[in-house]
């Protein structure tokens, strides 16, 4: 049982929540009642989860020594020695084969498969080299989320809007900046540099970048809600949902600056009940406005 738990930690099942971005085209187009599209999106999400876990294994493999210096990452299966490199390698090939098979045989979507392979290659380059280059590292992470959205559009046949691409990039950039800030805080408190790219950041720079990105996100969302095509599709009152976007951003900034626990955006999104309430309220208001206030 302990070994199974270690394998689940190795493939980071908790990080799979990030892949809900594949479902965004389905939600924003309001075609989430069409069963064939739901099945296609679910298969794409499942396959991407397997591929993403391959990336996590490669990253942990490459970061074993650095992770052993980190206060929490030292407990990861590879860094702690609970799972050997050979065991991790076998798991990696199983996950890779499963993910590729889903996109090749179940979905039969060559364009989506190309994007998945591109994501894998980009993240391998990231793990071994690119993540050590400040600014480029956070942009690559953000691009990974944009790729997820494009995959969601390809497998469902839904055209991804420019607004969705922009907001996805900005939101993911905002969260990864919070993560980098947490790394800098740990480095300053412990004296351990767990990432080479930390030398390219400091709190002043990251604080400013977080504030700028949050402001742009809010403005972009407002512009999205009042754009003519969105008003035609969802109604003129969609701008009212900006309240929840505003609250969500401020809650996350509170977590970053006041509570200083933004090291894992996934854990924040999974465990923070305030954010859960905000997301649910945003989703419900979005749906109600679309169906009843158009």
Image (spheres, rainbow, N blue to C red):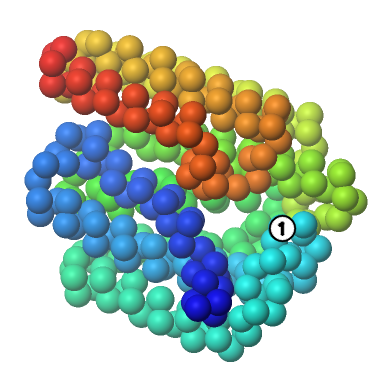
Q: In the displayed orientation, state which residue is furthest to the bottom.
A: 86
Image position of 148 (left or right of 58): left
Look at 41% across and 76% down and name the residue there: 95
Image position of 35 (left or right of 203): left
Look at 26% across and 68% down and name the residue there: 103
* Whole-percent x, y for residue 225 in the image: 31, 18
Q: In the displayed orientation, state which residue is furthest to the front.
A: 1
Dividing the picture into quadrants, the one containing residue 255 is top right
* Whole-percent x, y for residue 254 in the image: 63, 26
- Whether residue 118 is visible to the viewer of this picture, yes or no, is no
User: Split into 4 quadrants, where in the image is the C terminus?
Assistant: top left
Is 11 rendered above or below residue 131? below
Is 112 rendered above or below residue 227? below
Of 240 and 144, which appears nearest the observer?
240
- Whether residue 248 is visible to the viewer of this picture, yes or no, is yes
- Residue matched to label 1: 72
Look at 86% across and 43% down and name the residue there: 188
Image position of 229 (left or right of 242): left
Look at 10% across and 54% down and name the residue there: 36
* Whole-percent x, y for residue 53 in the image: 47, 67
* Whole-percent x, y for residue 267 in the image: 54, 47
């Amino acid at each position: 049982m302990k070994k199974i738990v270690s394998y689940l930690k190795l493939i980071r099942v908790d990080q799979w929540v990030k892949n809900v971005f594949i479902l965004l085209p389905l939600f924003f187009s309001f075609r989430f009642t069409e069963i064939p599209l739901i099945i296609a999106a679910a298969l794409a999400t499942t396959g991407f989860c397997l591929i993403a876990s391959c990336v996590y294994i490669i990253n942990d493999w490459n970061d074993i020594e650095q992770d052993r210096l980190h206060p929490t990452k030292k407990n990861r299966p590879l860094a702690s020695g609970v799972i050997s490199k050979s065991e991790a390698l076998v798991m990696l090939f199983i996950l890779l084969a499963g993910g590729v098979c889903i996109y090749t045989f179940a979905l039969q979507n060559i364009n989506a498969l190309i994007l998945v392979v591109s994501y894998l290659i980009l993240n391998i380059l990231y793990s071994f080299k690119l993540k050590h280059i400040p600014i480029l590292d956070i942009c690559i992470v953000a691009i990974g989320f944009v790729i997820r959205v494009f995959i969601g559009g390809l497998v469902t046949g839904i055209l991804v809007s420019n607004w969705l691409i922009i907001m996805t990039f900005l939101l993911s950039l905002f969260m990864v900046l919070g993560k980098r800030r947490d790394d800098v805080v740990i480095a300053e408190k412990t004296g351990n540099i767990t990432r080479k790219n930390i030398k390219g950041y400091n709190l002043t720079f990251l604080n400013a970048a977080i504030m700028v990105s949050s402001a742009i996100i809010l403005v972009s969302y407002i512009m999205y809600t009042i754009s003519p095509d969105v008003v035609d599709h969802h109604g003129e009152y969609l701008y009212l949902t900006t309240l929840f976007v505003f609250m969500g951003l401020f809650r996350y900034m509170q977590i970053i600056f006041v509570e200083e626990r933004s090291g894992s955006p996934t854990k924040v999104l999974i465990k923070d009940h305030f954010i859960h309430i905000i997301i649910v309220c945003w989703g419900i208001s979005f749906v109600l406005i679309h169906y009843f206030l158009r």
